[in-house]
Image (cartoon, grey):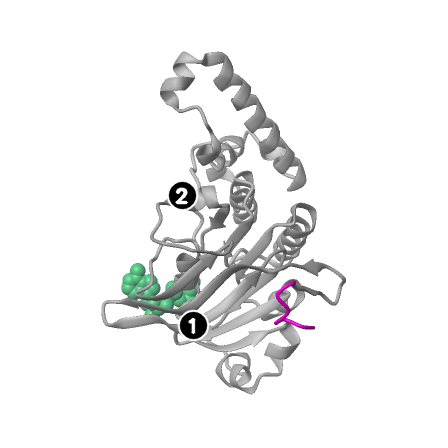
Amino acid sequence: MNQMNPEGYTTADGRKIGGVLMEMKNITLRFGGVAAITDISFDIREGEIRAIIGPNGAGKSSMLNVISGFYVPQEGEVWFKGYKRGPMKPYQVARLGIARTFQNIALFDGMSVLDNIMTGRLTMMKSGLLSQAIWWGKAQREETEHREKVEKIIDFLEIQDIRKTPVGRLPYGLKKRVELARALAAEPRLLLLDEPMAGMNVEEKEDMSRFILDVNDEFGTTIALIEHDMGVVMDLSDRVVVMDYGKKIGDGTPDEVRSNQAVIDAYLGVSHD
Ligand SMILES: Nc1ncnc2c1ncn2[C@@H]1O[C@H](COP(=O)(O)OP(=O)(O)O)[C@@H](O)[C@H]1O
Ligand SMILES: [Mg+2]
């Protein structure tokens, strides 16, 4: 594999990975005196499934928050689609084509599955509330379009039978799937998943893995994910960044990372749970 090729590379399973979509350059992020991330650089390529792994407290969620624009690092640069990114508001991030799920589920418990997923399209709705009141017809057409897109995602993730159910009544694994559906509703080019399989049983993990692979395959969505389960990461991802105490200690294919001595010492050989 030639990771340095600016045109991209072909994976072992024959998928074509493109050029650099996102580049993190020498990122340092501090909370007060504590450095959550120290001088980390890596890139995410178009079409890739990129994993970030590491023990608890390594700085993974912080890194995802830098990628999503939620945190602005004290040092370093974030490049997206060839442009250096400045501080951004959440809706600007969404318009760039970046969507995410959270380590702790962040859905509206009292709302139905369908309505929760619809909120994922809010930043894409052209008609504001006022114009919706005036141009009723236009807003209705728009609404129909949004509903059709959302229904497609519901079919895709096989949650038709719970579309009217309030999210608060769903088991954990399905909530996580609804969260994925909401992120997909924004039709992201880059999808960020913070521990999408944490707290799941084996069967739920297998389902979620399959859906992540299908999303990548079907929509060509680039995915950056944080995961604790090493087996899952090795199966799912094209390339892996390994973090420990805020530093990058490994970066490469699952095989490369697995045989990296620093990674073995810091992570694989030791249980941090
Ligand atoms: N909002 C915050 N304020 C202060 N410290 C934080 C904050 N978020 C994370 N940290 C600290 O930064 C370090 C990395 O945390 P985090 O990114 O959540 O790690 P991980 O996701 O790998 O478990 C930890 O020491 C954590 O306590
Ligand atoms: Mg975390």
Q: Nearer the viewer, residue 216 or 230?
A: 216
Q: Main secondary structure of the magenta part?
A: loop
Q: Which corner quadrant of the image does residue 74 belong to?
A: bottom left
Estimate the x, y position of residue 114 in percent, counting from the top left: 53, 31
Residue 197 seen by the camera: no
Q: Kindly identify the residue that appears in the image at 73 percent across and 59 percent down.
A: 15
The numbered mark at residue 92 is 2
Q: Is residue 250 above or below residue 175?
A: below
Horizontally, is 67 left or right of 223 in the view? Answer: left
For the residue marked with disc 1, what is the amino acid? Ile
Q: Secondary structure at mark 1?
A: strand
- Residues under labels 2 and 1: Cα distance? 24 Å
Sequence order check: which comes first, mark 2 or mark 1?
A: 1
Q: Kindly identify the residue that appears in the image at 50 percent across and 56 percent down.
A: 82
Q: Nearer the viewer, residue 245 or 18?
A: 18
Q: Kindly identify the residue that appears in the image at 45 percent across and 43 percent down.
A: 94
On the rendering, which quadrant does ligand 1 occupy? bottom left
- Crowd around label 2: few <14 · some 14–19 · many ≥20 (10 Å): few
Q: Is residue 6 magenta?
A: yes
Count the labels in the image.
2
Mark 2–mark 1 CB contact (< 8 Å):
no
Quarter containing the N terminus: bottom right
Estimate the x, y position of residue 200 in percent, counting from the top left: 56, 56
For the residue marked with disc 2, what is the amino acid? Gln
Q: Which residue ends up furthest to the left in the rendered image?
A: 32
Residue 110 seen by the camera: yes
Estimate the x, y position of residue 180 in percent, counting from the top left: 55, 46
Q: Which residue is mark 1?
A: 40
Residues in magenta? 1-7
